[in-house]
Amino acid sequence: MAQTKINQEMKRNAECLRNQDTLTASMLQETPFDNLCLTSQAILERAQKQGRSKCPRCHGSRMFYCYSCYVPVETVPVEDIPIVKLPLKIDIIKHPNETDGKSTAVHAKLLASEDVTIYTYPCIPDYEEMQHEIALIFPGPNSVSISNIPLSLQTKCKTDTKGLSAEPAPKCAKLEPSHSRLMSEDKLPKSENALKKIVFIDSTWNQTNKIITDERLQGLLQIELKSKKTCFWRHQKGKPETYLSTIEAIYYFLVDYHKEVLKEKYDGQYDNLLFFFSFMYKLIRKAKDSAGKK
Ligand SMILES: [Zn+2]
């Protein structure tokens, strides 16, 4: 009961904020990245003061990193960029019309290059053979929550071996919480908990809907993230504030996956994925704030 009341209160507050001028709203918020475990961003501060620099590969003039070659610019030495180790592989499918410079998918490639691959649609892998160990982040009518991944993959595996792969996977999110926990923790061997790869779609909302209907992505388990408010400065007009930028979605997915599926304590292991994002966020916020004071 109390929880519902709090939720309602939060909803009202959120609506209240939304009705105000966005600048005022952003000033009322606390800086959301104050408590992250981040590598020193001094190198980004220095690079920012020096202005644009050259990409060591294509020689294009860029700020911080090259969004076409996925490498930092000359004023940002590679060894000063943190390396983030992920618990699974990530494929990012980028829409060809998406402006490269605006996408935050590059952040993931720069910071976790071993584990992240970026594909430009329609050149994407065939996931058919991997259906029992892969999932797609997409809030569709059949999507399940992160905590339901192990059980849903297992159900999928069974359904597929029975030769019923054409049947849609049962919506596991509807299971009683206690029942679901019993199944996933007690009856599921640990090895079967292993989700190997997660696919993100990096594009605007309209383009995402086109990619999602591609037949190569049909039949993949779809995951819905818990709703979080975006901090992205290129927030899409008319889209809910819960429509996250790609790097935010990856980060929040990994934190929840770590806690709810791997069942390990979260100590900031993936915070450095926001190394560029949080820095750019603070820069833009500072610029907005000082523009507001004038
Ligand atoms: Zn380049």
Image: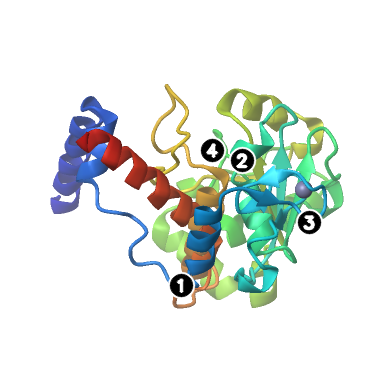
Tag 4 and tag 3, C-beta contact below 8 Å: no
Q: Report how far apart the C-alphas of labels 3 and 1 lie in the structure.
A: 31 Å
Percent x, y of residue 250: 56, 53
Say few, some or many: other residues with alpha carbon within 10 Å of mark 3 (under 14 / 14 to 19 / 20 or more).
some
Residue toward you, 208 or 216:
208
Q: Which residue is mark 3?
A: 56
Q: Earlier in the sequence, mark 2 or mark 4?
A: 2
Q: Which residue is mark 2?
A: 103
Where does the C terminus fall, quadrant-wise? top left
Amino acid at the residue labelled 2: Ser
Tag 3 and tag 1, C-beta contact below 8 Å: no
For the question of whether residue 146 can be seen, the reply is no
- Foreground label between 1 and 2: 2
Percent x, y of residue 12: 17, 35
Q: Which mark is residue 185?
A: none
Q: Is residue 126 left or right of residue 267?
A: right
Task: State which quadrant residue 81 falls in.
Answer: bottom right
Q: Secondary structure at mark 4?
A: loop
Q: Report how far apart the C-alphas of labels 1 and 4 lie in the structure.
A: 26 Å
Q: Secondary structure at mark 1?
A: loop
Residue 64 sits above or below residue 101 on the image: below
Which residue is found at the position 69% from the left and 56% from the top? 73
Q: Quick check: is the Cβ at mark 1 less than 8 Å away from ligand 1?
A: no
- Foreground label between 4 and 3: 3
Q: Quick check: is the Cβ at mark 2 less than 8 Å away from ligand 1?
A: no
Q: Earlier in the sequence, mark 3 or mark 1?
A: 3
Q: Which residue is mark 1?
A: 268
Query: What colour scheme governs how the chains and residues are painted in the rendered image of this protein?
Result: rainbow
Residue toward you, 265 or 290:
290
